[in-house]
Image: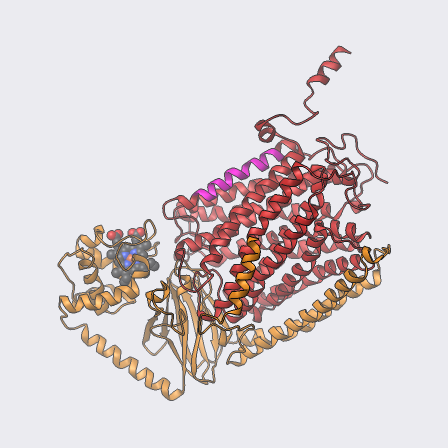
Amino acid sequence: MKIKITVIGALLLLASPSQHTFADWQLNMPRGVTDISRSVFDLHMIIFWICVAIGVLVFGVMFWSIFHHRKSRGAKAKHFHENTFVEVIWTLIPFAILIAMAVPATATLIKMYDTSDADVDIQITGYQWKWRYQYLGENIDFFSNLSTPREQIDNSEAKGENYLLEVDNPLVIPAGKKVRFLITSADVIHSWWVPAFAVKKDAIPGFINESWTRVDEPGIYRGQCTELCGKDHGFMPVVVDVRSAEDYNTWLAQVRAEQAAEAAAAQQELGMEALMQRGEVVYNQACAACHQANGEGLPNVFPGLKNSPIVMGDIAAHIDIVLNGKPGTAMQAFGDQLSAVDLAAVITYERNAWSNNRGDKVEPTEIEKLKAANGQ
Amino acid sequence: MATLSSTDSIAPHHGPARGLSRWLFTTNHKDIGTLYLWFSFLMLLTGGCMALMIRAELFQPGLQLIEPNFFNQMTTMHGLIMVFGAVMPAFVGLANWMLPIMIGAPDMALPRMNNWSFWILPFAFSMLLSTLFMEGGGPNFGWTFYAPLSTTYAPPSVTFFIFAIHMMGISSIMGAINIIATILNLRAPGMTMMKLPLFVWTWLITAFLLIAVMPVLAGVVTMMLMDIHFGTSFFNAAGGGDPVLFQHIFWFFGHPEVYIMILPAFGIISEILPTFARKPLFGYASMVYATASIALLSFIVWVHHMFTVGLPLAGELFFMYATMLIAVPTGVKVFNWVATMFHGSMTFETPMLFAIAFVVLFTIGGFSGLMLAIAPADFQYHDTYFVVAHFHYVLVPGAVFAIIAGVYYWLPKWTGHYYDEKLGKLHFWCSFIGVNLTFFPMHFIGLAGMPRRIPDYALQFADFNMIASIGAFIFGFSQLIFLTVVIKTIRGGLQAPPAVWDEPKGLEWTIPSPAPYHTFSTPPEIK
Ligand SMILES: [Cu+2]
């Protein structure tokens, strides 16, 4: 009875118009937007149809026998139990099909492995739980974080169109150019995947993996981290913004201008209020995943910062752990991840938020000095 | 002859001891088989509850019921418990019950070790489950526990996880030694190797696989232990170690492990289909050779789990070809089963229904496996729900259905009663619908791009996830029907004759039902 009710409930649910406006019933792999992704799609479809054909044949014979050779229809069992000829045939035919399949698969794989002659080189580093993109030779280096608001994840706000597949700073690449990715990790293993490019490569600490793509259509392409990498593995999307050569150059110029502005800001005194304001933003983006927005952490996994000995203690030790991290733990070295302004802001914020009220602050200039001394 | 009669009266071998000590100290293969089977069912329910928690959280997008860190503990524990606690012990239980009877032996070759193999398990799994209540929570790094997530970044309870794995490994290795010793030494006169029932053959080959790879698993967890506590850097890149090495070792164990979970299932199906088709198994010899080739190939395909780690092209190609090759012997098996049914005189009792469902659904899992073997396409499938769909198809309607089929098939022999056929069929249809509703949509969401092991997902995956969750609850709760059937059968039912089915072949059908506590104290004669 219970089961019946569940089944009816399920059918009703299926019949009712879907409550998620953006949900769809995509059944198949996307064809993608690169030569490689189209070759992969073709391979996928060939092997799929081979399986369907074999399935129809085998299950056809089976269901035919089930229907005709049943005792209730008076079928008498025959007693044959081997036949060398058919046994050899049904060993050899699959073998031949497999060889036929291996040829195009090998050709595609060889193409995928050819990372030579790239126009743009980008190093991709996985961190718990964000991606870092460094444009080699361009002096561009930034992090890409999930930008879906916490409220949407907690169901207190309606979910947006690109729920969990949106970031603050997407990777920007030029259309029509061969882009080579050098993929590695700073902590655990991640995996960088963009389905539309058919690029999936593990990001492994201590290794640099290579992969490449050439996208002709400008557009926004979305993917995710696909290797379990800890608590927020489901919350580190990949977004690639492919732009025309012209737009790409404009973007480069814009990023450079922002970098200059940032450097200038690091030379100024900001004062408590400005630091606290910015600090809250930085904290929620870079630290809250582990230490939680309320500063209480996750017991025995990530320490709380509210009333914590380091935050309540000497500021030098506090700055040190944020800049240099703690090797062998999930606490990363933020010295080369955040700008001096952001570092000063977040440290000041931690010292004064959540009734910590230490009342002291650190200015970007001091951080700059420390960073210079560290060689960061 | 006074001495003789007095030894006779105290001789312990006439029946089981009473009370708890019967089960604690038993060296009887039937008792130990029963213990294994009940233990496995308990673990199936435990791991099943975890799966339901996962499916409940994934019913809708957003975080509703559990935190991501706990979600990861659930996926990890679900996998470990189902693999090591439910599927493997169930096959060992069936082996304990049936192997000695099928080969005409009085018991297993090493009965005391047999007792120990079983009794390690409750301790191992209590320890594993207790980690959920420890500071920092239980293992949260997936059942594949890739380093460094499972070493440098693991919760402190990982040490207990490592010891639990060690204990399970010892249990499996002892069980495997016992099975090999039994099959090679205790066959009744005239029971030559090529007369062995296929369930015996597949288990013999499985046991060799176990002995080959369980020590590798023990090795890899020991290396983790060293990294965590003794300052070595096997898997720590910062210390000159190699995280990819972990995956090579793990999958060198892990790939044969998946065949450990399916070869005995092949054996069971090869027993059941001939009985209900009333026709001998087609291609007995080729079945044996196919099983052996699958076992050998299983040692040279492990890298197909690691196509995206960035191996050299030549390695990638080698492992792609080797993996594709496995389709050949596996295909032979499926063709043989179909040929066995062809021109039979079939009836469709519950074991037969589960066996036929096995052939169809396992083959679907085999097809997706063949697709996954194509390395360039695997870059798209890898670590998505497509893989989740694939391995659940081969493990749930594959291994688990075979186990259930075997239980229905031999239950009248064990208890002396026929089970309730109506309830059995109800159980079958609920399971069949539930399992497909759960796992078929996962192919679609995987191809559409949903990664595995995530507690929340983008909106385009919502509909199929909802269907999968509904299916999971149907499948989960239908196992209570199974429990009901088994308990009812133990307590009573239509009396079963020695040959429970319509002229089944095999020694187990020559002894009374229920099977007496001791069988074949004098070996039977095999013609
Ligand atoms: Cu990741």
Q: Position of residue A278 (x, y in %)?
A: 21, 69
Q: Residue at x 47, y 56 (%)?
A: B54
Q: Is residue B127 magenta?
A: yes
B467 relative to B361 in the view: left or right = left
Q: Which image quarter holds the C terminus of chain A? A: bottom left
Q: Position of residue B134 (x, y in %)?
A: 39, 44
Q: Quadrant of residue A311?
A: bottom left
Colour of the chain lettered A: orange
B145 relative to B428 in the view: left or right = left
- The residue range painted magenta reads B114-130
Note whether residue A343 is visible: no
Note whether residue B480 is visible: yes
Q: Is residue B82 magenta?
A: no
Q: Residue at x 35, y 78 (%)?
A: A137
Q: Position of residue B395 (x, y in %)?
A: 60, 55
In the depicted structure, whether residue B199 falls above or below residue B2: below
Colour of the chain lettered B: red
Q: Quadrant of residue A4?
A: bottom right
From the viewer's side, name the closer residue of B218 and B65: B65
In the depicted structure, whether residue B494 falls above or below residue B422: above
B148 relative to B326 in the view: left or right = left
What secondary structure prevails in the magenta region? helix
In the depicted structure, whether residue B249 falls above or below residue A101: above
Q: Position of residue A8 (x, y in %)?
A: 55, 61
